[in-house]
Image (spheres, coloured by chain):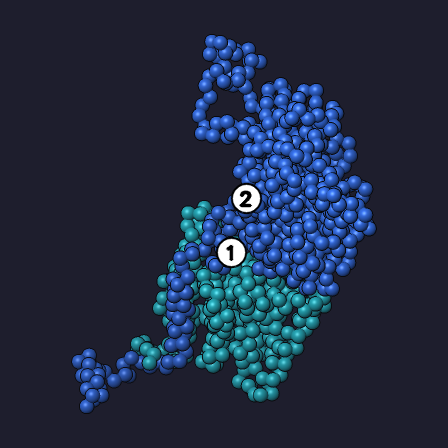
Chain colours: A blue, B cyan
């Protein structure tokens, strides 16, 4: 009897379900003619008590030492164009904002204990993922009150959140990330994940969600990327950019002056028309397979294309027939014993499936001039035409942004763009229908950040603009980074759209912001110490003289000529040697 | 009658500026030379925002002032006319200060007019700097001390100390003034007890308003110089550029330095302790952690009480021109550094040094003149020197 089969039998008979359950899949969804979303999903569930054939031992150690019951890690980069691409995949539940983000629910007897575990957790993950997570100190840590699952909190569990928006995400983070997978990225859909191709994308997000539930460890890893198909293909076909020969230029024949035969050609706007692409064109290699995957799971990996199947045709290598074929998707089960490639073809690539629109569109930007103060200006636009949308915003601002929350104002515009209402969180008006301050913790310099949570409600089809001022603090000269004039990154705001409790909340993040602070002259320490001390000594010396010395009339002093004085001095000196 | 009209006009100008020059008010409120983190009206409004929402006021945030101010502002806010009422409160305090000054000079109206017409006073008032609570209390304390009302003088000084800590350095001259030549251990103990009792009352009141002792942290902000916002003093750049290792040493030295002058000056000027107090106020206007032009105006307004020394001044013009030079270049260089980016922090720093030198010249020159008059009453035209 073959060993894997015997093993599978043992697993099936084990009490409490399978000791290990693993599945992985890849979804490809063209968002527009040129931007394709690729989503890799890896799910592992493992009994806590079991030996860890599949579950990464390092992660289990981290969980055990920090007493975390939940752990979420996000790496992200790029810009998700919600206007054209709609809501982020999976309602945004596994999607990262710019930089690195970590949050965890930690069991402890007291807050200080929980906080200590949190810092040690961040430190150990820092080494594990080659990221600067060790920079998450108390000045980067908050405890969310109404987002990131904080609403179903258990009292002995403490939720912590920290983010580092300036962290660049790159291959050194991807390699350890892939090492957590059962096949270490060597087989299955993860074999497509190559740093060069992934980090070339317009937007990408890597996530790890780890939780302990009912005695089982759940690990979900998701990688999303938006590939610019034309650019990816061009890089592959034509690595050294050079102009296309005239014959190869595709002309837009819908222009009435177009006459390619006579050399009048208006190049076609990219992203429409014909496309012919294979998986190996997009990722550099086909899906590799091997014994690894079949050993650990009975479920073969799946790859699905979400396309209107009338306009698109897909053929698999070895003429494999699709497992599922419907009007809006084509899925294949990847065979366990050979490499797998797909070729995707369409005459009208611009015909894609309708996207789930984001319930609101949010953007936040810094306004103002000079390095003394500035403002945060946020715009929230409702896309739903029929019902009001309520959402919670969660903002964490570094302590050197001294927020004037009393200056908060909002303005509501209706669908026609006319101003409907303005207001603020004034002291007398504790809650209003539109803007409500749920939680505010002012920053403590060098100790904790500002933490603001607001509940905002916009009527259908309206636009809400909020604004508040802040002051920029000067720092000690050694607190500035080496490139002080580049500015400081501010974490994205997290926006969670409230729904009735049954359905999951849509979550998304605004872009991060770059704040410039006033800077001192870094070459000055000695000069400043010397000059300031001189000025103080001048004042002190003058006053000391005035206060301690006595007044006399100049003429009452015995007159001495200069020669006499010198002679007296000289004799004093000579007497010293005699 | 003529003087009354002038004073009424000066008060009227304040109202007109408030009613019709809102933009000017906003500019002044945000000016670093006028509003410091410890006296800014914007910070007071932010504190009021915390207070009215029952947020923790002193656990972080930007409010570093007394809880009593919050209570007063909250009362004004409850009426719905906080802007107008607060401004009226500020003008009232300004007038009270002017009266207190005049009362020290036999109610000579010119003294009050000089105070009210001082552009520094007007700028500080229009910015609604909360320094006015401290300076009015100081002036009231000096005025009552001069009339030997020891209890009142000590109470006002305690209030001033409560608002901004550094007026505590005025304790020796004010105590000596209010007790006068009858200085004995008993009278000393009695006045000191009044000071302690009044301070404790302020603290108890603050505790009742703030609900915890956390409010004491606002003294820590100035003692440890926790807000690095630039101002016209010499602390900010010194501590921005200071090496970590020396930080505690220089913090102690700078704090000590603010307090060391008052006792020796009181002893030396025991014939005229008021002038010791004036000189200490002048030194505070440059050496305390967060000075503003409101401190300069307080010092300069007290000098007219000593009009008799003007003949003895040696560098009056130099000092006044240096002060004018610094006053014009302070906002200019700050703008070059912060807004235009065509200058750097050294520009503003240099001008604060100029300002300190100008103030040093005024202080030493007036001190010289007072001591010179004490020496021979200015009767002799012979040259006087110090040995």
Residue B154 at what x, y percent from top left? Answer: 60, 76
Relative vertical location of residue A118 with respect to residue B151 in this rendering, above or below: above
Kindly identify which residue carries mark 2: A171
Q: Chain of mark 1?
A: A
Q: Residue furthest front?
A: A1
Residue B235 at what x, y percent from top left? Answer: 48, 64
Q: Are marks 1 and 2 in contact (CB under 8 Å)?
A: no
Task: In this rendered view, identify the residue nearer to me: B112 or A102.
Answer: A102
Task: In this rendered view, identify the residue nearer to me: A350 or A479.
Answer: A350
Q: Chain of mark 2?
A: A
Q: Quadrant of the N terminus of chain A?
A: top right
Task: In this rendered view, identify the residue nearer to me: A138 or B139.
Answer: A138
Mark 1 or mark 2, which has the lower sequence index? Answer: 2
- The circle on residue B146 is none
Residue drawn at 69 percent across, 61 percent down:
A114
Task: In this rendered view, identify the residue nearer to me: B327 or A423.
Answer: A423
Relative vertical location of residue B241 with respect to residue A547 in this rendering, above or below: above
Residue drawn at 63 percent across, 36 percent down:
A289
Mark 1 closeness class: few <14, some 14–19, many ≥20 residues within 10 Å: many
- The quadrant in which residue B87 appears is bottom right
Q: Quadrant of the C terminus of chain A?
A: bottom left
Name the side, left or right, on which A9 lies relative to B50: right
Q: Nearer the viewer, mark 1 or mark 2?
A: 2
Instruction: Describe the element under mark 2 as helix, strand or loop.
Output: helix
Q: Residue furthest bottom?
A: A578
- The circle on residue A474 is 1
Residue drawn at 53 percent across, 65 percent down:
B225
């Amino acid at each position: 009897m073959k060993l894997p089969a015997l093993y599978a039998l043992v697993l099936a008979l084990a009490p409490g379900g399978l000791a290990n359950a693993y599945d992985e899949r890849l979804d490809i969804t063209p968002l527009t003619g040129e931007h394709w979303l690729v989503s890799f999903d890896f799910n592992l569930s493992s009994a806590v008590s079991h030996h860890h054939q599949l579950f990464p031992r390092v992660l289990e150690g981290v969980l055990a030492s920090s007493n975390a019951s939940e752990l979420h890690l996000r790496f992200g980069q790029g810009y998700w164009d919600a206007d054209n691409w709609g809501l982020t995949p999976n309602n945004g539940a596994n999607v990262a904002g710019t930089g690195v983000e970590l949050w965890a629910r930690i069991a402890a007897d007291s807050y200080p204990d929980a906080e200590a575990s949190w810092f040690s957790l961040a430190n150990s993950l820092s080494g594990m993922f080659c990221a600067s997570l060790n920079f998450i100190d108390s000045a980067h840590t908050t405890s969310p009150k109404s987002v990131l699952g904080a609403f179903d909190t258990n009292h002995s569990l403490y939720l912590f959140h920290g983010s580092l928006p300036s962290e660049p995400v790159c291959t050194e983070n991807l390699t350890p990330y892939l090492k957590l997978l059962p096949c270490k990225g060597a087989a299955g859909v993860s074999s497509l994940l190559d740093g060069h191709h992934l980090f070339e994308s317009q937007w990408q997000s890597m996530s790890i969600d780890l939780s302990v539930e009912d005695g089982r460890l759940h690990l979900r890893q998701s990688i999303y990327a938006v590939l610019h198909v034309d650019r990816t293909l061009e890089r592959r076909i034509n690595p050294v950019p050079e102009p296309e020969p005239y014959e190869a230029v595709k002309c837009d024949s819908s222009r009435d002056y177009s006459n390619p035969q006579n050399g009048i050609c208006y190049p076609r706007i990219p992203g429409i028309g014909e496309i012919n692409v294979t998986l190996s064109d997009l990722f550099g290699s086909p899906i590799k397979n091997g014994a690894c995957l079949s050993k650990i799971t009975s479920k073969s990996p799946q790859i699905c294309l979400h396309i209107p199947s009338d306009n698109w045709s897909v053929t698999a290598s070895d003429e494999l027939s699709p497992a599922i074929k419907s009007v809006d998707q084509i899925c294949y089960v990847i065979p366990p014993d050979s490499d797998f490639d797909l070729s995707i073809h369409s005459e009208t690539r611009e015909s894609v499936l309708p996207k789930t629109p984001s319930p609101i569109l949010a953007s936040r930007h810094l306004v103002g001039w000079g390095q003394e103060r500035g403002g945060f200006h946020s715009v929230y636009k409702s896309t739903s035409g029929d019902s009001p949308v309520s959402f919670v915003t969660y903002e964490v601002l570094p302590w050197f942004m001294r927020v004037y929350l009393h200056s908060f104002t909002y303005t509501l515009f209706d669908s026609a763009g006319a101003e409907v209402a303005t207001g603020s969180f004034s002291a007398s008006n504790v809650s209003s229908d539109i803007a409500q301050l749920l939680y505010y913790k002012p920053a403590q310099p060098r100790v904790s950040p500002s933490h603001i949570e607001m509940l905002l409600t916009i009527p259908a089809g309206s636009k809400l603009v909020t604004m508040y001022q802040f002051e920029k603090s000067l720092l000690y000269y050694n607190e500035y980074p080496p490139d002080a004039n580049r500015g400081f990154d501010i974490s994205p705001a997290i926006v969670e759209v409230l729904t009735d409790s049954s359905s999951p909340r849509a979550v998304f993040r605004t872009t991060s912001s770059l704040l410039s602070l006033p800077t001192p002259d870094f070459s000055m320490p000695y000069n400043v110490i010397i000059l300031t001390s001189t000025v103080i000594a001048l004042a002190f010396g003058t006053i000391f003289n005035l206060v301690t010395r006595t007044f006399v009339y100049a003429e009452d002093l015995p007159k001495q000529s200069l020669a006499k004085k010198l002679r007296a001095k000289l004799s004093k000196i000579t007497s010293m040697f005699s | 009658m003529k003087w009354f009209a002038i004073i009424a006009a000066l008060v009227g100008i304040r109202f007109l500026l408030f009613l019709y020059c809102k933009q000017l008010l906003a500019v002044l409120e945000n000016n670093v030379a006028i509003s410091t983190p410890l006296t800014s009206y914007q910070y007071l409004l932010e504190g009021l925002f915390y207070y009215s929402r029952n947020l923790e006021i002193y656990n972080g945030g930007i409010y570093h002032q007394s809880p009593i101010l919050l209570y007063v502002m909250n009362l004004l806010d409850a009426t719905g006319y906080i802007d107008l009422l607060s401004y009226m409160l500020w003008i009232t305090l300004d007038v009270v200060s002017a009266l207190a000054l005049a009362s020290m000079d036999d109610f000579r109206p010119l003294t009050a007019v000089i105070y009210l017409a001082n552009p520094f006073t007007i700028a500080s008032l229009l910015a609604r700097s909360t320094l006015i609570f401290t300076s009015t209390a100081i002036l009231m304390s000096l005025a009552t001390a001069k009339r030997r009302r020891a209890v009142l003088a000590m109470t006002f000084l305690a209030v001033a100390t409560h608002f901004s800590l550094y007026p505590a350095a005025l304790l020796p001259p004010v105590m000596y003034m209010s007790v006068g030549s009858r200085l004995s251990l008993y009278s000393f103990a009695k006045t000191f007890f009044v000071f302690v009792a009044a301070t404790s009352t302020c603290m108890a009141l603050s505790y009742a308003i703030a609900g915890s002792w956390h409010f004491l942290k606002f003294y820590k902000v100035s003692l440890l110089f926790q807000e690095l916002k630039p101002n016209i003093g010499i602390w900010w750049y010194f501590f921005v550029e200071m090496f970590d290792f020396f930080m505690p040493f220089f913090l102690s030295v700078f704090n000590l330095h603010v307090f060391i002058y008052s006792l020796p000056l009181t002893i030396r000027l025991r014939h005229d302790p008021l002038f010791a107090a004036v000189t200490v106020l002048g030194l505070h206007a440059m050496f305390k952690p967060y000075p503003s032009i409101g401190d300069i105006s307080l010092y300069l307004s007290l000098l007219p009480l000593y009009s008799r020394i003007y003949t003895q001044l040696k560098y009056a013009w130099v000092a006044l021109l240096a002060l004018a030079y610094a006053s014009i270049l302070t906002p200019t260089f700050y703008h070059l550094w912060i807004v235009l980016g065509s200058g750097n922090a050294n520009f503003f720093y240099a001008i604060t040094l100029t300002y300190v030198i100008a103030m040093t010249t005024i202080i030493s020159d007036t001190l010289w003149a007072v001591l010179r008059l004490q020496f021979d009453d200015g009767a002799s035209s012979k040259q006087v020197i110090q040995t």
